[in-house]
Image (cartoon, rainbow, N blue to C red):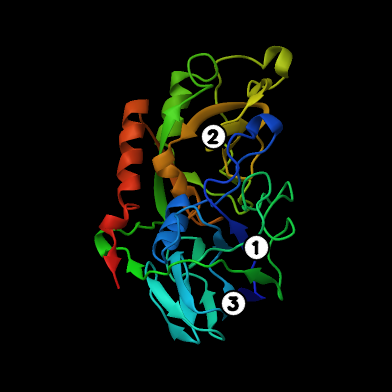
Amino acid sequence: MTLEILDPGPQATIQDYPGRVGLASRGLFPAGPVDHLAFRLANLLVGNDPGAAGLEIPSGRFTARARFAGVVAFCGAGTPTVNGRPVPLWEGVPVEPGDVLASTAPEGPGFRLYLGVSGGIDVPPVLGARALHTMGGIGGLDGRPLIRGDLLPVGRGEPRRLRVPQSLRPRYHQHWELEVVRGPHADPEFVTPEDWREFTSARWRVNLNSGRLGVLLNPHRFTWARQDGGIAGDHPSNVLDASYPFGGVIVNGDVPTILGPDGPSSGGFTVLATVTHAALWRIGQLRPGQDTVRFREVDPEEADALAAHTEFVLDPAHLEEC
């Protein structure tokens, strides 16, 4: 049982969730899906464990042939078809051997499409996960994005056909809000209170060069609360090398960047804020060169409450039978 790749689009990859946790001290961010919510839902809708290996498809462009009988689910942003006939997002769809699964770019907001396959994509795990770390060349299929002609082994499972109720489906936008927790490098030691107010009130544009490593935002000249980085460097954004959090908003000179799942695990730039778990999935749907972001500060208690709300939809009891 395999899935034959006919057209992988710009950079389709195999991912699982949560990826390689616990390896940051060895220089590896976890990899895994940028939009963890759509990815896990795609798995649940076909009867898989939510962390099973599936496909991440940037810009929604993709074509493959099923060489198995089972159920698939498309979640996220795209316009999917089976044998040329439109099929719904957020819903399990039966497939038979020879069926052609395809998608074109999304007609509205959103950037990444996720494909869940009953039984999961059964490539060998590397360092505890099947997720491809694009910069490290680790995991996935032979440590690389998919190419035409790849045959992906599909595992055996107990297929189900579920759908996400309309009221629980994520909403995609052109102008996004991301909840962040302040720091670890914020005011008053690193930036001024005025800098922080500008950071949380400005509308930041997503740079065209954004990807799995990070989401680059438009340059901004902060005032900074210090003249330089001391022994760490001449620019006030410099700090002595330290660990970065996944979802950290680092400031490299004048350029804020939200670190993605394949980003660097450490470095010498300030981390002005950290995106909450509940908001991380939205990073995966930001369209490079088109969308904007606004940051909203929350405290750790609110961040926990928002995370619990996000996880609500992932309870199979809240999904519908097809």
Answer left or right for 286 relative to 22.
left
Image location (x, y in percent) of residue 262: 63, 45
Secondary structure beneath disc 2? strand
Q: How many marks?
A: 3
- Can I make out residue 299 in this image? no
Image location (x, y in percent) of residue 58: 57, 62
Confirm or deny contact between disc 1 and disc 3 (CB under 8 A): no
Where 9 falls versus 14 (above or below)? below
Q: Which circle's residue, 1 or 3, is located before the other in the chain?
A: 1
Q: Which circle's residue, 3 or 2, is located before the other in the chain?
A: 3
Residue 161: image quadrant is bottom left
**CA–CA distance in space, label 3 to label 2:** 34 Å
| Residue picked out by circle 1 | 11
Instruction: Say what amino acid the circle numbered 3 marks.
Output: Thr
Q: Which residue: 54% across, 34% down?
A: 248
**CA–CA distance in space, label 1 to label 3:** 12 Å
Q: Which circle's residue, 2 or 1, is located before the other in the chain?
A: 1
Say which of marks 3 and 2 sits in front. Answer: 3
Image location (x, y in percent) of residue 95: 47, 80
Instruction: Say what amino acid the circle numbered 2 marks.
Output: Val
Say which of marks 2 and 1 sits in front. Answer: 1
Few, some or many C-alpha atoms within 10 Å of disc 3 (few <14, some 14-19, many ≥20)? many
Instruction: Say what amino acid the circle numbered 1 marks.
Output: Gln
| Residue picked out by circle 2 | 249
| Residue picked out by circle 3 | 63
Answer left or right for 98 relative to 158.
right
Disc on res. 317: none
